[in-house]
Image (cartoon, rainbow, N blue to C red):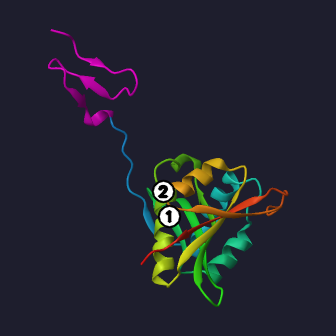
Amino acid sequence: MPKPMFLQRSGILLLNDAGVFMIRPHDLVTYSMPQIRRASPVDIPAIVAIENESFADPWDQAVFLEALTYYPTTYFVAVCDGAVAGFIVGGLEDTGENIYGHLCNIGVSPRYRRRGIGKLLVRRTEHQFAMELATGVQLEVRVSNTGAQLFYQGIGYRPVFGIDQYYANGEDAFVMMKWFRF
């Protein structure tokens, strides 16, 4: 009878004597679900800290506070284990013909990345935009940030055009959009 053995690739699957793969509960890494809530002024220091560790040209505290004043219904944080793990700043823009949402800034603390927090923040903000009668959402992303582009494409955003020298360092941006279908 063969001895049970671990599969080398994942380290969490076990082949028992009957040849059945087993996952042992203590082998799984689990994370608590983050709470998504509207941001408040007390969240700003944590948001600024995440921004500073995430971006080369971060927004400063005054910009985050001003955004909270202008966009209180579309500005959210993700809280994990009592700490702010991520944030998203969204705003509504009315062109006269359409109302659309604008994802202005999003960040997730490096220690909480790859857990779906960014996707939860975007989905919550999209939901708020839809409740406020937006027909779609726009965002800008660095041409060099292919990881972010793939993230947004994976949740339904499509590049629509580019903007030359959009960022402070002269880097170009892609504008990506997602249209709601009601």
Looking at the image, which residue is at 50% across and 47% down?
114
| Residue at image coords 36%, 44% | 30
Image quadrant where one finds the C terminus: bottom left
Badge 2: how crowded within 10 Å, few (<14), some, or many (20+)? many
Q: Give 33 or 158, whichever is nearer the viewer.
A: 158
Residue 157, x across and y down, in percent: 56, 62
Describe residue 34's horizontal placement relative to residue 55 as left or right.
left
Label 2 close to label 1 by CB (< 8 Å): yes
- For the point 53% across and 81% down, the residue is 134
Q: Tell me the CA gap for discs 2 and 1.
A: 6 Å
Amino acid type, label 1: Leu
Residue at image coords 16%, 17%: 17
Image coords of residue 26 (percent x, y): 29, 35
Q: Between residue 92 and residue 88, name the one nearer to us.
A: 92
Secondary structure state at the residue bearing disc 2: helix
Please check the rendered image and state whether residue 23 is part of the magenta-colored stretch, yes or no: yes
Q: Which residue is mark 1?
A: 121
- As for residue 73 lying within the magenta part, the answer is no
Would you name the residue on which mark 2 appears?
Answer: 117
Locate residue 163: give its quadrant: bottom right
Q: Give residue 31's mark.
A: none
Q: Could you tell whether 67 is left or right of 118 in the image?
A: right
- In the picture shown, does residue 181 fall above or below 153? below
- Using the image, determine if residue 111 lies above or below residue 119: above
Rate crowding at label 1 as few (under 14), some (14 to 19) or many (20 or more) other CA atoms within 10 Å.
many
Looking at the rendered structure, the number of numbered marks drawn on it comes to 2
Q: Find the magenta span and give its range.
A: 1-27
Q: Residue furthest top?
A: 1
x%, y% of residue 135?
53, 79
